[in-house]
Amino acid sequence: MNGIRAHSDPPLRRAHAVGAVALAFLLTAGCVQTKMSIAAQSAAKTNALDGVNKLAVMPFDNDDKGVVTAYLESQLFDAKASGLTAVTLVDRHSIDKIKNELRLGRDGGIDEAKAKKIGRLLGADALLVGRVLPGNVTKNTSSHQATECTAYENSNKLFKKCISTGIKTVTCTTLVATVSIQPRVIRVTTGEVAYTKVQNGQASHEYCDNGGTAVDERVLQSNALANALREVRADLAPYRYVIDAPLKQSADGLTGASREAFEGALAFARTGRFDRACSQFTQLEAEGARTIAVRYNIALCDEASGRLFEARRRIVEIDGDLRTPDPDINLALQRLERRVAEQAGTPGASRSDKPPKKR
C-alpha cells in the first residue's frame, strides 16, 4: 500500500526545506520491497490567505512561552522562502512594538476595530491570531498474560537456554495527550474572519512493566501541540509531503533477456540507482515488453520526475487493460487525479509538465 508522509518536522522546530525528489528503498521483514519516495506538493487546504500579501502573526492567548507564534512564523517563512507562497510576514520587532504601544493582551483583546488599526500600523493585509485551549493527558491501563522464562540452564554460556517457563500478568499503561488550538485569520480592510477552526493534536505513548519507560507528560503535550500546529500550517499555505510507492516486482510475462533486464532494473532500484532502473524499464517497453509491472514502474518514474500528466495517462491506460482490480493501480489513479488537479492551482508548483494539447 502506498504510504504518504510529511517531511521531517521535529516538534516545534523549523521544518527543513525540501530539495530535489528523493528516491529510496525499504527492506521489509521476510522479503525485499522496493519503494520509490516521491516528493509531492499540495495546495493549502483553505483559501484563508488568498490575496494576502503581508501577514502579521500575533501572540496567541495562553501561549506563555511563545512557541505557537514562533512555530507558525517559521513555517510560513519557510513556505515563502521555498516559493510555496507569496505571503510576506511582518517582522516580530514591529509587532512587539505595536502590541506594547496599544497595550494589547492576547487574542481575546483583538476585535474588528483593533484589527483594522493594528493592520494599518503594521501595513498588514491580515492578522493571524488565536488561542491555545486547555489540554489534558489521560492514562489508561490494561493487562494481558505473557510467557516468561522462570529458570535457565546452569552454564557459563553468554546466552543461556531457558529450561522452564511460566505465565505472568503484564500491566501496560497508555498515555494520550490532547491539545487544541483555535487560530483565526482576520482581514484588515473589512474586519472579516476569513478562517477559524479548532485544530486538535494528539500524541500517545505506551509502556509496560516488563519493558519500556514512562515519558514526561510535558514532552507528550509538546508533541500533541506540534501535531495540531502542522494542521494549521497545512490549512494556510501550500505544503510538501512524500509518497512511498512500491515498485511492482513480478516478472510474469517476461522471458529470456527481457526477464533478466527487468530483474536487473529492480536490482539497481534496491541500491538507490533509480536513474538506471527507470532507464531500463523504459528500454524494456521500447523493445516490446509491455507487461503491467513494466508500464506501472515507468509511470512511477514519470511521477517522480514531475511528469504528472504522462504518469496519469499511463495509469489510466493500464487500468483500462485490467481484468481484475489492482490495489497499486487504484491508489496511483486516485493519487494522480488529485495531484494533477492540485498542480494547476498550487502557487510555486512546477510547470515543466504541461497537459497534452487537445487535437
Image (spheres, grey):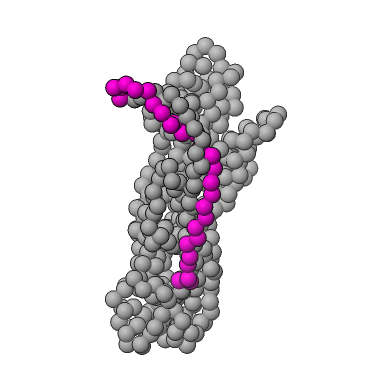
Vertical relation: 130 (above or below) 7: below
Q: Is 156 in the magenta?
A: yes
Task: Name the residue: 36% across, 88% down.
Answer: 102
Q: Residue at x 32, y 73 (%)?
A: 91
Instruction: Give the image location of residue 15, x and y in percent.
Output: 36, 55
Quadrant of the image occupied by residue 270? top left
Picture residue at 56% right of the left edge, 38% below the top: 1
Q: Position of residue 315 (x, y in %)?
A: 60, 36
Quadrant housing the C terminus:
top right
Camera-nearest residue between 77 and 275: 77
As drawn, 145 above or below 102: above
Q: Residue 194, image x and y in percent?
A: 53, 73
* For residue 275, side relative to residue 289 (left or right): left
Instruction: Give the extent of the magenta segment.
Output: 132-158
Q: Nearer the viewer, residue 205 or 54?
A: 205
Residue at point 38% right, 75% down? 59
Q: Residue 156 or 357: which is nearer the viewer? A: 156
In the rendered structure, the answer to whether residue 77 lies left or right of residue 350 reads left
